[in-house]
Image (cartoon, rainbow, N blue to C red):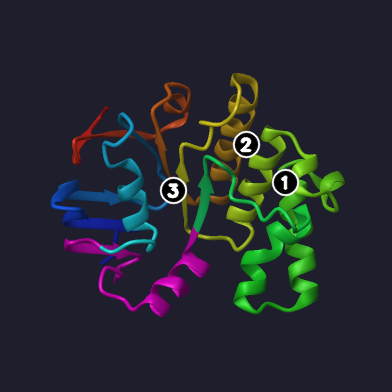
């Protein structure tokens, strides 16, 4: 029997803040199939980032179960979670998260270096990823020499280089103007169509919704379909 790519079963996440307990997610159940493009809408503080972090093996739930490719990841060791992230998940962040002392090529190649791939393989795959996002001419540049739109395209190339099954994008257009936002979204949508990976994109903007095959929303830590 085929499993959904991602599955959350009655997942809750609670954080302690002094004497207070913050309920970031409350009894969330969710499935994502291979090849979907899902947008997650909601205001700041609603639980969108926590939702992505749990399915991306960045964080563990307070209660409930998280599965990726049929494997329960919610109880894995830190080493096991790192292995899942390196192989199965690509991340695109609002503020790019590029290493300022590394070139564009080195930033994109980093996931493969962490996997211990051979140098020739890394070179071929990094050059191909940068070509796909239109930045072959920027390989030797440093992040400080790039525009915001170019930095986000580098982040997209880094997210796809290791051919993950799941791409998690947390407000990827939140730090871009409307023109660059459109370009980045079109790029992600094109790569999604070509490669067939699953995209889960958190956003409070309306623009990404047009690319979604499915929409969900989070309000006060609770999931709502069709938002």
Q: Earlier in the sequence, mark 2 or mark 1?
A: 1
Return the x and y of residue 6 as percentages of the image width and height. Answer: 32, 57
Q: Secondary structure at mark 2?
A: helix
Which residue position holds label 3?
Answer: 35
- Report the Cα–Cα distance between label 2 and label 1: 9 Å
Q: Earlier in the sequence, mark 3 or mark 1?
A: 3
Q: Is residue 26 left or right of residue 167?
A: left
- When the figure is inspected, residue 151 is found, relative to residue 74, above or below; the finding is above
Image quarter in which the C terminus is found: top left
Give the magenta range.
61-89
Image quarter in which the N terminus is found: bottom left
Counting other residues with Cα less than 10 Å from the Cα at mark 3, is it few (<14), some (14-19), or many (20 or more)?
some
Q: Secondary structure at mark 3?
A: loop
Q: Nearer the viewer, residue 213 or 178?
A: 178
Q: Earlier in the sequence, mark 3 or mark 2?
A: 3
- Report the Cα–Cα distance between label 3 and label 1: 19 Å
Which residue position holds label 1?
Answer: 132
Which residue position holds label 2?
Answer: 187
Q: Secondary structure at mark 1?
A: helix
- When the figure is inspected, residue 207 is found, relative to residue 65, above or below; the finding is above
- When the figure is inspected, residue 81 is found, relative to residue 62, above or below; the finding is below
Residue 161 among magenta residues: no
- Report the Cα–Cα distance between label 3 and label 2: 16 Å
Return the x and y of residue 77 as percentages of the image width and height. Answer: 34, 79
Q: Is residue 145 left or right of residue 169?
A: right
């Amino acid at each position: 029997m085929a499993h959904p790519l991602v599955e959350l079963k009655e997942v809750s996440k609670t954080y302690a803040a002094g004497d207070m307990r913050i309920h970031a997610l409350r009894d969330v159940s969710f499935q994502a199939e291979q090849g979907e493009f899902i947008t997650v809408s909601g205001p700041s503080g609603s639980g969108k980032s926590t939702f992505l972090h749990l399915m991306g093996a960045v964080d563990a739930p307070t209660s409930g179960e998280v599965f990726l490719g049929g494997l329960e990841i919610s109880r894995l060791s830190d080493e096991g979670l790192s292995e899942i992230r390196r192989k199965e998940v690509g991340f695109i962040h609002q503020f790019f998260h590029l290493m300022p002392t590394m070139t564009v090529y080195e930033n994109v190649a980093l996931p493969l270096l962490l996997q211990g791939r051979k140098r020739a393989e890394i070179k071929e795959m990094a050059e191909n990823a940068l070509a796909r996002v239109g930045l072959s001419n920027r390989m030797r540049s440093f992040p400080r020499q790039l525009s915001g739109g170019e930095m986000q395209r580098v982040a997209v190339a880094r997210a796809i280089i290791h051919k993950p099954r799941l791409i998690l994008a947390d407000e990827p257009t939140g730090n871009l103007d409307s023109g660059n936002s459109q370009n980045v979204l079109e790029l992600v949508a094109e790569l999604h169509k070509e490669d067939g990976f699953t995209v889960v994109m958190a956003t409070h903007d309306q623009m990404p919704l047009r690319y979604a095959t499915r929409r969900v929303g989070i309000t006060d830590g609770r999931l709502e379909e069709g938002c």
